[in-house]
């Protein structure tokens, strides 16, 4: 008897990917996608940098041509980035109106910045275009350096920031270079730190050359130069009447004693003296003046043997007085 062979058919047998194989495919696709994205980002960044460099190079050429003809770089430009001072010359307008132009040293040097896609490049008259350095964060004071008095939040110490210069020099805005200058009594840095006296500043320097009442000035972030009314609010909280606060000259009763070192207010204002408009210094350890941000330069004067407080206007914006910041 002949027995036939059984033929097994593969027609209905199912084939497919295992879970491991699927994971391998997914991971491979992810890696390839990441490579493509990284490559695109890299190319896009290079294109942005090339565009910024090209625009800055072009602007630099225009500025050098202007200087060749007029012997100085432009000190001001209009909204179309055309030079207006010292010579108005539209032949040398910068093509990119987004350029940030800053002149320094009265046209002797300059800096240019340009931002595109969150990338900022800069160039100066003696450098090539490069990635701009991040601006330093504005200084802040720790919470322990503030004291709450009534509805106000005052700094516990006089401000002491900036680079010391001699009293016979005027403080300036340095052509927009954002350099803070300070005086120290008797031209001695130790007098800025002793007793937390702080620096002495002309009104313009203290205000960072703003004329807006309540401006931040050179105070830390989230604080400002107190206005004349801010000082009145403090004085009335310490016991003055409105009429006394509004008066000029010596006012109040014992509010000066409360504000000076060892007084009940906790402000501990030191008798840091001040710098005269002529360049000399005086009143160290016997008196102090403190600026307000009000345009008439209302100031406060405290004296060693006097319990009251002087309020005076136009005290002389070229004098060097102390600064006590007020929180916003």
Image (cartoon, rainbow, N blue to C red):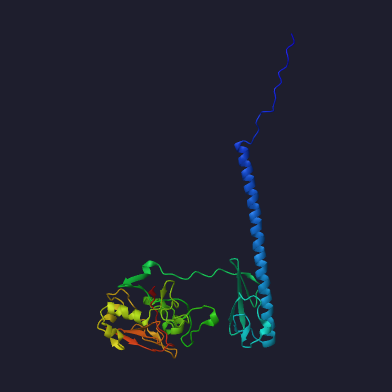
Screen quadrant of the N terminus: top right
Q: Is residue 18 above or below residue 185?
A: above
Looking at the image, the residue that sits furthest to the front is: 12
Q: Is residue 222 left or right of residue 255?
A: right
Screen quadrant of the C terminus: bottom left
Residue 61: quadrant of the picture: bottom right
Residue 252: quadrant of the picture: bottom left
Q: Can the viewer see residue 147? A: yes
Residue 292: quadrant of the picture: bottom left
57 or 180, nearer to the observer: 57
Q: Residue at 46% of width from left, 86% of height from top?
A: 167
Q: Is residue 78 left or right of residue 166?
A: right
136 or 164, nearer to the observer: 136
Q: Give x and y (percent) for residue 3.
A: 73, 12
Q: Can the viewer see residue 308? A: no
Q: Is residue 100 left or right of residue 169?
A: right
Q: Give x and y (percent) for residue 320.
A: 42, 85
Q: Residue at 67% of width from left, 60% of height from top?
A: 43
Looking at the image, the residue that sits furthest to the right is: 2
Looking at the image, the residue that sits furthest to the top is: 1
Q: Give x and y (percent) for residue 309.
A: 30, 84
């Amino acid at each position: 008897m002949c027995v036939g062979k059984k033929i097994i058919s593969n027609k209905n047998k199912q084939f497919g990917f295992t879970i491991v194989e699927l994971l391998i495919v997914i991971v491979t696709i992810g890696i390839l996608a990441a490579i493509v994205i990284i490559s695109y980002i890299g190319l896009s960044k290079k294109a942005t940098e090339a565009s910024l460099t090209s625009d800055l190079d072009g602007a630099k050429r225009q500025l050098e041509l202007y200087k060749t003809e007029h012997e100085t770089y432009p000190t001001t430009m209009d909204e179309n980035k055309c030079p207006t001072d010292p010579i108005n010359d539209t032949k040398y307008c910068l093509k990119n109106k987004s350029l940030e132009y800053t002149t320094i040293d009265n046209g002797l040097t300059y800096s240019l910045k340009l931002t595109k896609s969150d990338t900022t490049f800069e160039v100066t008259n003696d450098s090539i275009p490069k990635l701009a350095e991040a601006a330093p964060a504005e200084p802040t004071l720790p919470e322990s350096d503030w004291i709450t008095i009534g509805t106000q939040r005052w700094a516990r110490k006089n401000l002491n920031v900036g680079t010391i210069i001699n009293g016979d020099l005027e403080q300036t805005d340095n052509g927009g270079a954002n350099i803070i200058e300070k005086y120290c009594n008797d031209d001695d840095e130790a007098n800025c730190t002793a007793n937390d006296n702080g620096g002495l500043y002309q009104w313009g320097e203290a205000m960072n050359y703003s004329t807006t009442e309540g401006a931040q000035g050179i105070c830390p972030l989230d604080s400002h130069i107190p206005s004349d009314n801010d000082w009145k609010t403090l004085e009335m909280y310490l016991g003055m009447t409105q009429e006394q606060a509004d008066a000029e000259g010596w006012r109040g009763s014992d509010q000066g004693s409360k504000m000076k070192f060892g007084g009940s207010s906790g402000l501990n204002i030191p008798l840091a003296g001040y710098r005269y408009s002529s360049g000399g210094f005086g009143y160290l350890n016997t008196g102090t003046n403190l600026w307000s941000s009000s345009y008439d330069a209302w100031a406060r004067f405290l004296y060693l043997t006097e319990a009251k407080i002087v309020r005076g206007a136009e005290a002389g914006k070229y004098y060097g007085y102390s600064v006590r910041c007020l929180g916003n």
